[in-house]
Image: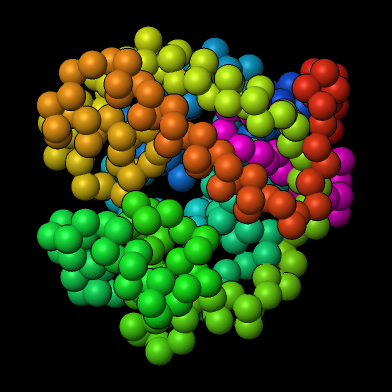
Amino acid sequence: MTEKEPLLVLVGPTASGKSALALRAAERLGGEIVSADSVQVYRRFDVGSGKPTAEERQRVPHHLIDIAEPSEPMDAARWAALAEDVIDGIRARGRVPIVCGGTFLWVRALLLGLVPAPPADDAVRARHAATAEREGRPALHAELDRVDPESARKLAPNDFVRVSRALEVRELTGKPLSEWHAAHGFRERRHAARLVGVKWSQEALSERIAARARRMFDAGFVDEVRGLVADGYASCRAMNAVGYRQIADALARGVASRDVVLDSVVRATRVFARRQRTWLRDEAVTWLEPGAADSFAG
């Protein structure tokens, strides 16, 4: 593979096997993996983010994992700039970059550029955070539905970060974020790319999600969240990630039943997986059957 060949990008919903596919492809192609995961970038968010194991990192070099403290801001623009540098370095070594992850907004930022909306405003975000604390996150979503219904339809009521950003853009510019997106059109192709994923039936993926959640709980997911909360990270951005938020909320309410908390994580993850599938619906993804994925060579 040369620098002019398409960038290999492994996408798909959570628990679909992206990481295993990336490992196989990297070993066969002489590649290195560039993580496109908005939780794996943070140190200490290990179990619930499904970070590669030490053995997997020895097998194949991984990049953009454990690069930020939990309190450190990380967004699509910053990640895309870091990814560009990493990809250039991999290619300069004569190796093959393989982008892998479920944070598709970040993947789009890398491949297509970002909407030229205004930068973040700390005062606006602080006001939104206060509203969410006082009235609940759905109250912010209801306000977004009033001023930008198209954006609201795409976002979950509890997705504070993205709902706040959409409201922020509307407040700062007077124009809904959906109009910014429509005007941009994501036509600035920065990388030719080949998108590949593993195709599962909804029933099979649902079972995989449940099994993955059980493994994470067995590996200490609840204790990981408990430690992060105890160290003051309850309100950090990564704690909004699926799984982390449900466990943190359960701990705050004093819910002790493992089965109850596990069920809430599984249900939230299934909803998230459906949203991921929706995001990818209009993309030109090569979907591999699970059997074919075992012999995938790039």
Residue 210 appears left or right of 33 = left
Colour scheme of this structure image?
rainbow
Q: Which residues are magenta?
A: 1-20
Is the residue 235 above or below the residue 282 in the image? above
How far from the left and from the top, in percent, is residue 284? 80, 52
Q: Is residue 109 in sight in this rendering?
A: yes
**Residue closest to the eye, 19 or 198:** 198
Q: How many dots with numbers?
A: 0
Which residue lies most toward the top here? 218
Is 254 magenta? The answer is no
Q: Quadrant of residue 247?
A: top left
| Point 27% across, 57% down: residue | 137
| Point 34% across, 52% down: residue | 158
Q: Quadrant of residue 20?
A: top right
State the quadrant of the C terminus: top right
Is 13 magenta? The answer is yes
How far from the left and from the top, in percent, is residue 155? 46, 58
Residue 195 appears left or right of 86 = right
Which residue lies most toward the bottom here? 174
State the quadrant of the N terminus: top right
How far from the left and from the top, in percent, is residue 107? 62, 52
Is the residue 197 above or below the residue 260 in the image? below
